[in-house]
Amino acid sequence: MARGVVLRSAPEEGAEQRGADRVRERVPDTVPAAPRVRGVVEQLPASRDGVRHIVWDWNGTLLDDNHANLAAANHVCELFGRPALELEEWRRIFRRPLVPFYEELLGRPFADGEWERLNTAYNSHYQQFLPSCDLADGARDTLRGWRERGGSQSLLSMAAHEHLVPLVTEHGLVPHFTRVDGRHYDADVDSKAEHLVHHLAAQDVDPATVVLIGDIDDDAHAARAVGANAILVATGLMSRERLETTGYPVADSLTEAVRMLNG
């Protein structure tokens, strides 16, 4: 980690554990299996802050898909009679949970069936642009470098699991990861936190040895809820200014994010 960078701000005593316990209570006993990779190099000795394992986000982090997300969002805006968005405006306002965000964006609450209509329209339009999405700058080298140093890493995305795995496989990235998980089910709360608990438990990884690298504030909230670290990258769906309000370090690239760990 770079000098002077604090990965995790000090929480209220016991807050992280209470948050993790609440999340664990909601994790189902059975979740569909995810790819696990054998033969990964031995785990990296703890860094100065004990981080041995990276959990990577996918959309907006390892995958450069901002243009696809914006195109899908503007398709939704057109369907619901709202003016189109520019990317920087989108990065200033996007947030989870998605339902209240879109209600605010469209200026009214959803009528029955409208959220489902919006979600279907968004995903369909996004899929049309997906073939034009490439990996983020430096993604392959960054993953390879961390693995060659002896670090372990996995992938956790809020994208549907059945859509995520073929895409990661197509890019040839599965061998870098100890586990790949998309969204297996819809949690009660629209956040990555619950999914992160299962993802780490399935690998028997101590959250205190983990850094989650992602592109939105929900990645930071999820990490804090389970007692993990976080580094955010200002390359995806949220502006640097908004990411900085989380109190976690913000990097301008994947390379810089891992350099913060290397010191």
Image (cartoon, rainbow, N blue to C red):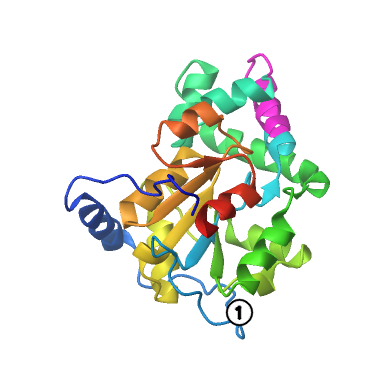
Whether residue 133 can be seen here? yes
- Say left or right for 223 vs 237: left
Residue type at tag 1:
Val
Residue placed furthest toward the bottom: 39
Comparing 42 with 45, the one in front is 45
Residue placed furthest toward the front: 3
- Say left or right for 115 vs 140: left
Region of the chain picked out in magenta, as a range: 70-84
Locate residue 142, reporting x and y percent: 67, 59
Does dot 1 land on a helix, a strand or a loop? loop
Which residue is found at the position 46% from the left and 68% from the top?
52
Whether residue 158 can be seen here? no
Disc 1 packing (10 Å; few <14; some 14–19; many ≥20):
some
From the viewer's perspective, is residue 116 above or below residue 94? below
From the viewer's perspective, is residue 103 above or below residue 257? above
Locate residue 11, reporting x and y percent: 24, 46
Q: Which is the main secondary structure of the residues drawn in magenta?
A: helix
Comparing 232 with 219, the one in front is 232
Locate residue 242, reporting x and y percent: 48, 29
Q: Is residue 56 inside the magenta stretch?
A: no
Comparing 254 with 37, the one in front is 254
Locate residue 144, reporting x and y percent: 69, 67
Which residue is found at the position 32% from the left and 57% from the top?
227
Tag 1 residue = 37
From the viewer's perspective, is residue 168 above or below residue 34? above
Q: Is residue 72 inside the magenta stretch?
A: yes
- Say left or right for 80 vs 208: right
